[in-house]
Image (cartoon, rainbow, N blue to C red):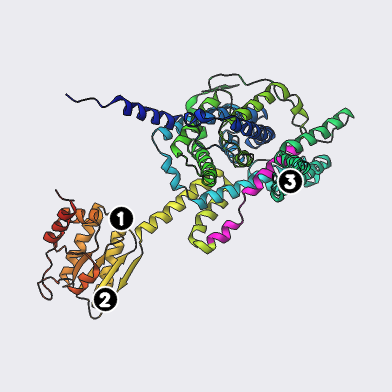
Amino acid sequence: MWARGPPEPRRRRWLRALRRRLPVLGWLPRYSPGWLQLDLIAGVTVGLTVVPQALAYAEVAGLPPQYGLYSSFVGCFVYCFLGTAKDVTLGPTAIMSLLVSSYAFHDPVYAVLLTFLSGCIQLAMGLLHLGFLLDFISCPVIKGFTSAASITISFNQVKNILGLHGIPRQFFLQVYETLRRIGETRPGDAILGLVCLAALAGLREMKSRLPPASHTEPLATRASYLIVWTCATARNALVVLFAGLVAYCFQLRGSQPLTLTGSIPQGLPPCRLPPFSKAEPNGTVPFGTMVEDMGVGLAVVPLMGLVETVAIAKAFASQNDYRIDPNQELLAIGFANVLGSFFSSYPITGSFGRTAVNAQTGVCTPAGGLVTGALVLLSLAYLTSLFYYIPKAALAAVIISAVVPMFDAGIFRTLWRVKRLDLVPLCVTFLFCFWEVQYGIVAGVLVSGILLLYSIARPPLKVLGQGTLLVQPGSSLHFPAIEHLRDVICSRALSAAPSPCSIILDCHHISSIDYTVVVGLAELLQELRKHGISLAFCSLQDQVLRALLAADLEGFRHFPSWEEAERCGGAEPGGSGAAPFDSTSTSESSLLHKGLIQ
């Protein structure tokens, strides 16, 4: 009968597994009053940023403004318990709002269902440990997508800066219609929008140039620094507040030259199941039809949500010397989306701008998200009547100010210097995203995949020598590459004058091979033997050597190094030259010595 292990180690394993799934258990027992003060400051500061941004991003998503607020509090609460990065904040973002506008058709019912299904897919990916799929989305594809999105989102807000209505959302039509109707610009919206843009740019530049205040400075200096830093950090809230006061003053005077946000329903969103059908005047749209309508969005939205969150978490984790778990991040964002769909949220992800604010204010734990979420709930409960007076031009300025830094002009120059071939997926993604976002992402991933497969199918080969050819593959051999290797060796060996008597294949870069490669090598050995040329292998790694020995290739010879193989002259078939090299017995002896064959 099997003896049971001691209970204590099992208990420790359970605790480790629980902490891995609930990261809050790792930092909560060590929580201190000093952390509480910093988390409160960070939470309030991020809250002042997220409220105006949420109203603005709902416009990008093509949804009523309240849906931006509905999407801004659940992620804060969930990530506090399930998140692995102390700085990350979840909520609506410009990129995700752009995707929602493409796949939810500006319909809240589709948006909420997309949130639920995206969250389910992300949860499944996290439970199945599929976070590695992110590795197949290359940096040029992400850069191309974010740069195109920056231009698309910014130009989408030009109509609100100019006070134009009835502008189509397709990018090229949008550009055409905006330029055609630029004479219909409303002066009040244009002036306020440009002033807000200038104020946001000035406050951002002020913050970047603000020198850190030392504790040795006088109190007045430190107080001045704190005031300036707070104003620059909460610039979105200040600009929106200023614009709202201007609009309110015009309203009191009986004239309104500005386009306002309008009425927003007051109160918290009801907690209810996400909609699985949609009522129409001529019938009901069933669940299956809604899923078909969203199509590839059910793959793009969950994946891009994870890409944003993990990329942001990794960036800030590397700065603060802690590690994140991509699969745990999948679970966190998936659960946030599933739970958020019960509160009419549209899909959310990590926000780079708000995460940067969180980090700069010195947040110590994810508990700062509790404060941010509470501020959003308070805004929904008591402040929605004031949001009526927020001009759309001010919200457009907030969006443009947030997305312009996403355009990375330097990436083109960098890739030109580092690897010009990477410009291909970058440019393909960048250009196709102006047509449709999903086409840009899919095209970029396909081009990156083709380039990756090409590098596998055509590994670098170095061929040296005359009498004895030394062939050195620069990477592992996989089945698409074996025909290329055979063609190079045969063409070089059979076209040389005089023909080489032996060929040495240096395999020190080859870490694994598959069955197709073994078959190809067997055929290569036979073809070369017909022409009186021997083929010897050297520097085989143990795994590769085991595979070749198991295949029992006729004429297979192996040497520890290419110098020894060259000294033996490749041991030509027929027994001439140096003493024959008994590859089988020697190789098996080597493996027995290493303990690889029992």
Q: Are marks 1 and 2 in contact (CB under 8 Å)?
A: no
Residue for point 25% across, 69% down:
490
Using the image, determine if residue 584 lies above or below residue 363: below
For image coordinates 56% across by 48% down, the residue present is: 145
Most distant residue in the right direction = 253
Q: Residues within 10 Å of mark 2 (few under 14, many from 20)?
A: few
SS at mark 1 in the image: loop
In the rendered structure, which disc, 3 or 1, sits on the residue that comes first in sequence?
Answer: 3
Range of residues picked out in magenta: 393-415
Q: Earlier in the sequence, mark 1 or mark 2?
A: 1
Q: Which mark is residue 478?
A: 1
Q: What residue is drawn where x is 9% and y is 72%?
A: 575
Q: CA distance from mark 3 to mark 2?
A: 80 Å
Q: Which mark is residue 217?
A: 3
Q: Please give the residue where the numbered disc 2 appears in the rendered image.
A: 495
The answer to which quarter of the image holds residue 71 is top right
